[in-house]
Image (cartoon, rainbow, N blue to C red):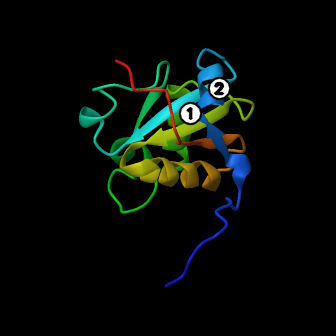
Amino acid sequence: MVQITNTQYAQPEVLVDTQLLEEHLNDSNFKIAEVDYDPQSNYEIGHIPNSVLIDWEKDINHDTTRDILTIEKYQDLLKRIGIKDNNTTLILYGDFNNWFAAFAFWVFKYYGYKNYKTIRWRNEKMTRRR
């Protein structure tokens, strides 16, 4: 059995704590997006205040092929969620322990978005709100 004694992240700069997130809930330089596989069971029930929904199936995947969305759909998604340029910090979180947020994170990286992060959940006091 392998024992892990040091649990440091390889790229800690892409993680934000819930405290920083809470401090920037109304900051126009931050955009919070919940990425869900099943928005009806998650985002619609409750979400972080001021967050937008990214539907993993409809917004991140190609309509007809087993691939990621096209560059045109990616640009449309940026507009829809209110991102005008790389100066906006995009913070992604989502269901299945952030798995779908991680997938979206990779898609944004693939298309060259530079300023994105994901939430490091630990002892969080923030809760989803309607």
**Residue occupying image coordinates x 51% and y 27%:** 81
In the image, taking residue 103 as reference, residue 23 lies left or right, namely right
Image quadrant assignment for residue 86: top right
Q: Is residue 75 left or right of residue 114?
A: left
- On the image, the x and y values in percent for residue 14 come to 68, 47
Picture coordinates of residue 28, whole percent (x, y): 66, 17
Marks 1/2 in contact by CB < 8 Å: the verdict is no
Residue to which mark 2 is pinned: 30
Nearest the viewer among 89 and 86 is 89
Q: Is residue 83 visible?
A: no
Residue 119 image position (x, y, % from top left): 56, 41
For badge 1, the amino acid type reads Leu
**Residue drawn at the location 58% of the way across and 32% of the way down:** 18
Q: Against 19, is 38 above or below? A: below
Q: Marks 1/2: CA distance? A: 13 Å
**Marks 1 and 2, the one that precedes in the sequence:** 2
- Give coordinates of residue 1: x percent, y percent: 49, 85
Taking the spot 65% from the left edge, 26% from the top edge, the residue there is 30
Q: State left or right for residue 68 relative to residue 110.
A: left
Q: Is 2 above or below relative to 22? A: below
Disc number for residue 112: none
Q: Secondary structure at mark 2?
A: strand
Identify which amino acid the numbered label 2 is placed on. Answer: Phe
Q: Nearer the viewer, mark 1 or mark 2?
A: 2
Q: Residue furthest bottom?
A: 1
Which residue does the numbered mark 1 point to in the structure image? Answer: 78
Q: Nearer the viewer, residue 81 or 130?
A: 130
Residue at 73% x, 48% y is 13
